[in-house]
């Protein structure tokens, strides 16, 4: 159950944001075994000057063009799966014309009791886990 947040400069088009999330979701399905129907994303837009990123920390980037990809998902993926995900997402970004050097990604893992989609309660309760 991933929930993606894309933190992007306001200047990035909705079409590119949608494409980035489509590629991110495809990578999550392929690299991490995510259910294809678990498709959720929130795009958070900021003025470029409100996005403060070091231009050379662990790689070169253009701070005003950098995006942050935040992925909240159920825990349990191996470090190897996570590394493959990062690599695959950056490959996909390049294929759609977005410079992967201008991306920062991080995962926030949690459990089934940490999600709720209805009045029935947590995913843990609804699925009887």
Image (tube, rainbow, N blue to C red):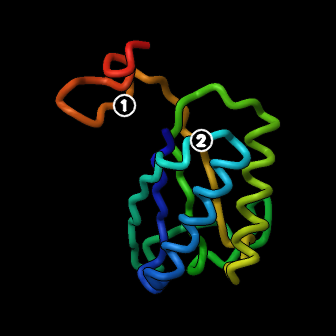
**Total numbered labels placed on residues in the image:** 2
Helix, strand or loop status at disc 2: loop
* Res. 34 mark: 2
Is label 2 or label 1 in front?
2
Please state the horizontal and vertical placement of residue 66, each as a whole percent of the image. Answer: 60, 73
Residue 78: quadrant of the picture: top right
Please state the horizontal and vertical placement of residue 10, each as a whole percent of the image. Answer: 41, 81
Question: Which numbered disc flags the more N-terminal residue, 2 or 1?
Answer: 2
**What's the distance in space between the residues labelled 2 and 1, CA to CA?**
15 Å
Q: Residue at x 21, y 25 (%)?
A: 120
Residue 124: quadrant of the picture: top left
In front of the other: 66 or 49: 66
Relative to residue 102, is residue 88 depicted above or below? above
Q: Kindly identify which residue carries mark 1.
A: 115
In front of the other: 56 or 39: 39
Q: Residue at x 47, y 79 (%)?
A: 48
Residue 99 falls left or right of residue 26: right
Please state the horizontal and vertical placement of residue 125, each as a whole percent of the image. Answer: 32, 16
Please state the horizontal and vertical placement of residue 61, each as a whole percent of the image. Answer: 71, 73
Residue 121 falls left or right of residue 79: left
Q: Residue furthest left?
A: 119
Helix, strand or loop status at disc 1: loop
Q: Crowding at label 1, few (<14), some or many (≥20) Cα neighbours within 10 Å?
A: some
In front of the other: 129 or 77: 129
Residue 38 falls left or right of residue 26: left
Q: Residue at x 74, y 71 (%)?
A: 101
Q: Crowding at label 2, few (<14), some or many (≥20) Cα neighbours within 10 Å?
A: some
Residue 64: quadrant of the picture: bottom right
């Amino acid at each position: 159950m991933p929930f993606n947040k894309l933190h992007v400069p306001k200047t990035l088009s909705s079409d590119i944001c949608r494409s980035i999330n489509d590629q991110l979701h495809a990578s999550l399905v392929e690299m991490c075994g995510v259910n294809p129907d678990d498709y959720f994303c929130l795009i958070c837009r900021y003025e470029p000057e409100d996005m403060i990123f070091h231009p050379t920390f662990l790689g070169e980037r253009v701070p005003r063009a950098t995006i942050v990809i935040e992925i909240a998902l159920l825990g349990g993926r191996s470090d190897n799966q996570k590394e493959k995900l990062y690599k695959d997402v950056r490959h996909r970004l390049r294929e759609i014309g977005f410079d992967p050097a201008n991306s920062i990604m991080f995962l926030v893992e949690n459990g089934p009791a940490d999600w709720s989609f209805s009045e029935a309660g947590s995913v843990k309760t609804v699925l009887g886990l």
